[in-house]
């Protein structure tokens, strides 16, 4: 039986399958079900700054939001998401499970990132995923200023906690490899490719705009895992679009240390974890690999450049059009 252990952001996982942030990992009971189904780790359902406001002891002046909205949340509109509730779920889960529990937070107010990070660490989280997202729409706001925001958040959080940190990235970055290096140098131990969001659309009959659920792009994640693997000092996780064990194998070959899966488990149930692990084990046995480290990253851009330079196979990671145009 092949050894499926892997190391992600300094945490040892019994296998590379992480149940991604979702309702499946919202409660201690849900986390236990994930472990029983065979998951290597879980990312808690992301909690947002707005949900934390119900704690009630944060001055209104700290927030750039309508007072009516703040009053609504503090009066119990989002009470089920209060920080005490989230921390309690982590505490309860840690009594029942042995797999790593990675919390996930999103803030808009810079001073609150370290505060919330400290809370989840105290509750017992094994790691923290920073769900950083800001859509720049000001033409005068530079890409360097946008990147600096990531670095500043990580540095401030690192002052408050000792558990490992990962950053969930978006693909719409002017120079993603540069940002990845900055994140790693600032103390981020993990990089997650990618976050995905609601997408805008237009009803041409009603002449109104609305939002629809976005879709994960497996091959986009595969490209950047392959390009970044072993070129920055951080472990990589691929998120989105995995439909079978083949997708896991591909991401591992590209250089990922783990994969995050959600939609598949909604479609087929958590029992799909066992099927994925069986498929991964069978593939490893067929190819005579005794551990994941025996093949992880074998098809990354870096390793292919070293091994197959004359064949040009590594070009497939960055070739987006018929003509090869790229810069170092």
Image (cartoon, helix red, strand yellow):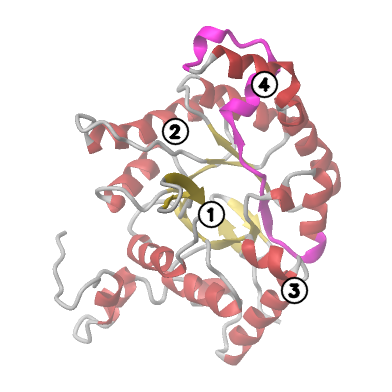
Q: What residue range appears in magenta?
A: 36-64
Numbered mark located on residue 213 in the image: 1
Q: Residue furthest bottom?
A: 286
Tell me which label, 1 or 3, sits earlier in the chain. 1
Mark toward the viewer: 2 or 3: 3
Q: Which mark is residue 73?
A: 4
Residue closer to the observer: 216 or 90: 216
The residue that appears at 38% across and 42% down in the rendered structure is 183
Residue occupied by mark 2: 154
Tell me if residue 57 is in the magenta stretch: yes
Left or right for 231, reference 40: left
Q: If you read the primary sequence from the N terminus, does the residue marked by circle 1 or circle 4 appear first?
A: 4
Going from N to C along the chain, the mark reached first, 1 or 2, is: 2
Residue at disc 3, secondary structure: helix
Q: Residue 318 lies in what quarter of the image?
A: bottom left
Residue 287: x percent and y percent?
A: 55, 89
Count of number-bearing discs: 4
User: Which residue in the structure is indicated by mark 3?
Assistant: 274
């Amino acid at each position: 039986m092949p050894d499926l252990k892997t190391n992600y952001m300094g945490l040892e996982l019994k296998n590379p399958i992480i149940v991604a942030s979702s309702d499946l990992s919202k409660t201690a009971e849900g986390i236990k079900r994930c472990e029983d189904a065979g998951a290597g780790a879980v990312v808690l359902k992301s909690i947002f700054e707005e949900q934390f406001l119900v704690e009630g002891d944060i001055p209104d002046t700290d927030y750039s939001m309508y007072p009516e909205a703040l009053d609504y949340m503090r009066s119990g509109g989002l009470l089920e998401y209060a920080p005490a509730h989230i921390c309690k779920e982590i505490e309860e889960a840690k009594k029942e499970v042995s797999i790593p529990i990675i919390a996930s937070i999103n803030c808009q107010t810079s001073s609150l990132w370290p505060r919330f990070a400290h809370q989840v660490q105290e509750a017992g989280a094994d790691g923290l995923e920073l769900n950083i997202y800001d859509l720049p729409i000001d033409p005068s706001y530079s890409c360097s200023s946008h990147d600096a925001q990531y670095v500043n958040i990580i540095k401030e959080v690192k002052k408050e906690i000792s558990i490992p940190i990962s950053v969930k990235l978006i693909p719409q970055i002017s120079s993603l490899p540069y940002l990845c290096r900055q994140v790693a140098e600032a103390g981020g131990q993990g990089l997650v490719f990618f976050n995905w969001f609601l997408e805008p659309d237009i009803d041409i009959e009603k002449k109104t705009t609305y939002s629809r659920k976005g879709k994960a792009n497996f091959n986009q994640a595969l490209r950047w895992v392959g390009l970044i693997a072993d070129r920055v000092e951080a472990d990589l996780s691929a998120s989105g679009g995995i439909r079978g064990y083949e997708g896991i194998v591909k991401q591992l070959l590209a250089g990922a240390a783990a994969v995050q899966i959600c939609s598949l488990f909604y479609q087929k149930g958590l029992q799909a974890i066992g099927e994925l692990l069986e498929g991964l084990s069978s593939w490893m046995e067929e190819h005579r690999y005794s551990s994941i480290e025996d093949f992880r990253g074998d098809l990354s851009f870096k390793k292919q450049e070293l091994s197959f330079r004359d064949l040009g196979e590594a070009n497939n990671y960055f070739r987006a059009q018929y003509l090869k145009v790229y810069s170092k």
